[in-house]
């Protein structure tokens, strides 16, 4: 078998999205999700395509990587090949050789789903554990009651409010109203919802975005934030419950979210909203 690494163009994005969507199921530990691409679409399709790498076998996409930064790749594979030794060794070779155009020389990291053979192959090649992440899951089977907030779906008319809450929550100026409109124009946003939570005084205090991978597949919550002036009042829990309910309305089988384990406040918020933590996932890093 010959696995070929590629740098897709914008014309290849529909095939990339279709492959990633088809790989989502409830038997697989949390992995790279179409919602991750949907959120990244805010930079525009050309810049997004430049951050992607695909591996194909006989023209079929069997693995996909997204450069979250120049030296950090988020990587997943077709479920039936997650334990395929030939693919795992090809991926390791491509990750370790800067000439392949995947990762640069020196220190670099990769996110790989738990249970993938690639984790063992990389460890055997000297890659070591790095940042710990906590995946959480809400099975959507029980009642979902939102208390303390009035939650609405945000659209073009409230994009300025939605992005202002995000900028405050994450202390970052990056997510502007202009970027929201680029994100919302992307094809993945058809299966997404931006939520705004208002307190009893009518102030926008929390926001979240949810992404469906299609009916019967797990959906993703990415991101969730509470305005810095309104923390400590249960708004994170409330918007988390609303996010799970929105994904259930979209036909999702479960709601997924992942946060750095060191962010204990976020983990506690998701637990309070009914999410259950799974085994930690460790990034893998290659030294300089």
Image (spheres, rainbow, N blue to C red):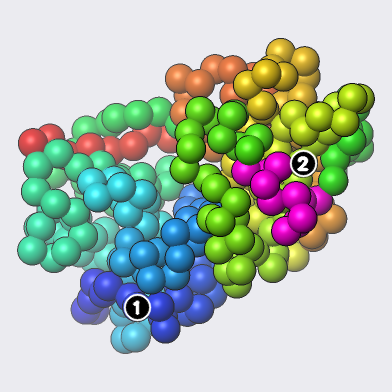
| Classed neighbour count for the residue bearing mark 2: other residues with Cα under 10 Å, few (<14), some (14–19), many (≥20) | many
Q: Quadrant of the C terminus?
A: top left
Residue lying farthest top? 232
x 43%, y 47%: residue? 113
Q: Secondary structure at mark 2?
A: strand
**29, above or below 88, in the image:** above
Q: Which picture quadrant has residue 196?
A: top right
Answer whether residue 64 is visible to the viewer in this image: no
Q: Secondary structure at mark 1?
A: loop
Point out which mark residue 212 bears. none
Q: Is residue 155 magenta?
A: yes
x 65%, y 35%: residue? 165
According to the image, label 1 marks what residue?
Answer: 9
Q: Where residue 162 appears, x then y in whole percent? A: 68, 43
According to the image, label 2 marks what residue?
Answer: 196
| Classed neighbour count for the residue bearing mark 1: other residues with Cα under 10 Å, few (<14), some (14–19), many (≥20) | some
**249, above or below 272, in the image:** below
Q: CA distance from mark 1 to mark 2?
A: 34 Å
Q: Where residue 195 appears, x then y in whole percent? A: 75, 45
Residue lying farthest bottom? 58
* Start-end of magenta stretch: 153-163
Q: Quadrant of the N terminus?
A: bottom left
Q: Which picture quadrant has residue 76?
A: bottom left
The main secondary structure of the magenta stretch is: helix
Left or right of 92 on screen, residue 53: right
**16, above or below 125, in the image:** below
Residue in the foreground of this view, choosing between 220 and 143: 220
Q: Is residue 212 magenta?
A: no
Q: Where residue 73 appears, x then y in whole percent? A: 31, 51
x 32%, y 54%: residue? 67
**204, above or below 250, in the image:** above
Q: Nearer the viewer, mark 1 or mark 2?
A: 2
């Amino acid at each position: 078998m010959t696995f070929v690494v590629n740098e897709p163009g914008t014309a290849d994005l529909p095939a990339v999205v279709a492959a990633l969507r088809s790989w989502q199921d409830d038997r697989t530990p949390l992995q790279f999700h179409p919602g991750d691409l949907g959120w990244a679409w805010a930079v525009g399709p050309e810049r997004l395509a430049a951050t992607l790498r695909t591996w194909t076998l006989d023209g079929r996409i069997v693995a996909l990587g997204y450069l979250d930064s120049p030296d950090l790749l988020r990587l997943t594979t077709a479920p039936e090949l997650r334990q395929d030794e030939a693919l795992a060794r090809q991926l390791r070779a491509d990750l370790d050789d800067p000439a392949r155009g995947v990762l640069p020389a020196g220190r670099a990291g990769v996110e790989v789903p738990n249970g993938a053979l690639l984790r063992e192959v990389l460890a055997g090649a000297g890659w070591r554990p790095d940042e710990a992440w906590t995946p959480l899951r809400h099975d959507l089977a029980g009642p979902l009651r939102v208390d303390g907030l009035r939650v609405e779906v945000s659209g073009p008319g409230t994009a300025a409010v939605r992005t202002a809450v995000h900028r405050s929550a994450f202390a970052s100026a990056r997510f502007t109203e202009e970027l929201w409109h680029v994100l919302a124009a992307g094809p993945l946003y058809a299966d997404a919802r931006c939520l705004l939570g208002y307190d009893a005084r009518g102030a926008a205090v929390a926001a979240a975005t949810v992404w469906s991978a299609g009916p019967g597949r797990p959906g993703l919550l990415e991101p969730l934030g509470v305005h810095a002036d309104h923390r400590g009042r249960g708004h994170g829990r409330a918007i988390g419950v609303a996010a799970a309910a929105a994904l259930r309305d979209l036909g999702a089988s479960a709601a997924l979210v992942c946060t750095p384990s060191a962010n204990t406040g976020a983990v506690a918020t998701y637990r309070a909203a009914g999410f259950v933590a799974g085994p930690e996932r460790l990034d893998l890093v290659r030294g300089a």
